[in-house]
Amino acid sequence: MRNITVALCCGLLVSGCSSFTERHQASGNFDYVTEQEAQPLALPAGYSAIELSRQYDIPALSPTANSALVGNKLDIRAPALPMAVAPESLISQRNQQTEIVFESFKNVEEFRADLWQKITGFVSAKTYGVTMSREGNSLTTRNIESDEYFMQTFGLTDQTLTQQYQFNLNVEPQGHRARVAVQLVKHLQQGNEVELNKFAQRRYETKMLNLFLSHLQSKEQVDKKVSSEFAGRGVAMELGFDSQQNTAFIIKSPFEPTWEKLSHVLPQLGFMIDDRDKTLGTYFVTFEQQKLNYLAILLKLKQSIPIFLSEGKFKIKLEKSGENSAMTIIDPDGDYLTPVKMAEMSNTVKEFLAAKQG
């Protein structure tokens, strides 16, 4: 009985260890490839043929189809699809390239620089390196040998891969939309160059593109957590000017944590947040005088006085200012608050920004 059990376990173990090649083939045998085409039925003289239904006829091959892809040479795996999980990313409607679309309201140069930073940051984080310096709109990785990524993504336990990918960036002229495409430019298995069909190549390219997008998503989550923790700290502020020479509150903190901190501070100042758009660096708010707890403010912030503004819809603009951030306020008429009004508000805003949150 013991011998039978051991033999059964060994048989199950062997049957479960299918090769990489077998995992993309149909199960069963491929005897059908040796079958001969059926011949028309020969009828005796005087008999007429029955009209046959053509409903289940197998369509003819396209002239461009590869007729050699039959039996164990046919890859039956479903096509891989790009997953737009990264911030500001969209699925591309173009099927000829493996690409993802990014949207932004930044200016063209800032948008391009930000995307290149994302691409080079990904390549560096994965230690894929580059074979050359960035040229124009393209970046090519070094030869990537089988590593943890390939082992996990493709389940390669009996194959080694050597691949090289090219990332191409194209920012549209208006600057609000860009495409990042990935192309597999070299593919070797077991050290031998293998020519892939377009579906297999697309699958590898999509896997690499999704790895890039997943990296951006993970980084965004980490940055948000760091910004959220940093936003809970108090920060200093002084009066100054933004890039357009409008009177601004210069907050001694980078853009990301300042952006998060404003989500806590603005409601305390009486600005109820209706919406916000990080790409525009804008909070859309409604100022309601009765929302302010003047007594609490005066007790907590002894040197400050409540903010007095006309009720209505305001915009709070935030932009980078070197290592700091510049905050300006646009009134319901679309005008920036005057230097006098900004100076009048500065002590109260400074006190709330300096206070720890949570």
Image (cartoon, rainbow, N blue to C red):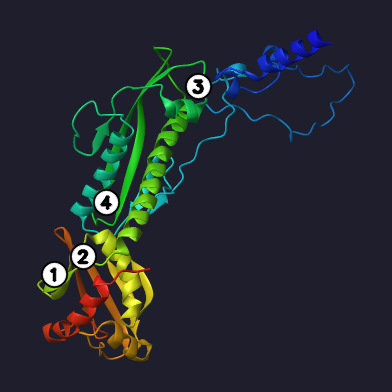
Disc 2, disc 4: CB below 8 Å? Answer: no
Viewer-nearest of discs 2 and 4: 2
Relative to 209, say whether 348 is above or below.
below
Secondary structure beneath label 4 = loop
Residue carrying label 4: 172
Which numbered dot is residue 319?
2
| Mark 1 vs 2: CB contact within 8 A | yes
Q: Which of the two discs, 4 and 3, labels the residue nearer the N terminus?
A: 3
How far apart are the alpha carbons under marks 1 and 3?
54 Å
- Front position in the image: 352 or 109: 352
Q: Which mark is residue 156?
A: 3
Which quarter of the image is occupied by the C terminus?
bottom left
- Is there any visible trace of residue 36 in the rendered image? no
Which disc, if any, is residue 242?
Answer: 1
Give 199 or 329, whichever is nearer the viewer. Answer: 329
Say few, some or many: other residues with alpha carbon within 10 Å of mark 4 (under 14 / 14 to 19 / 20 or more).
few
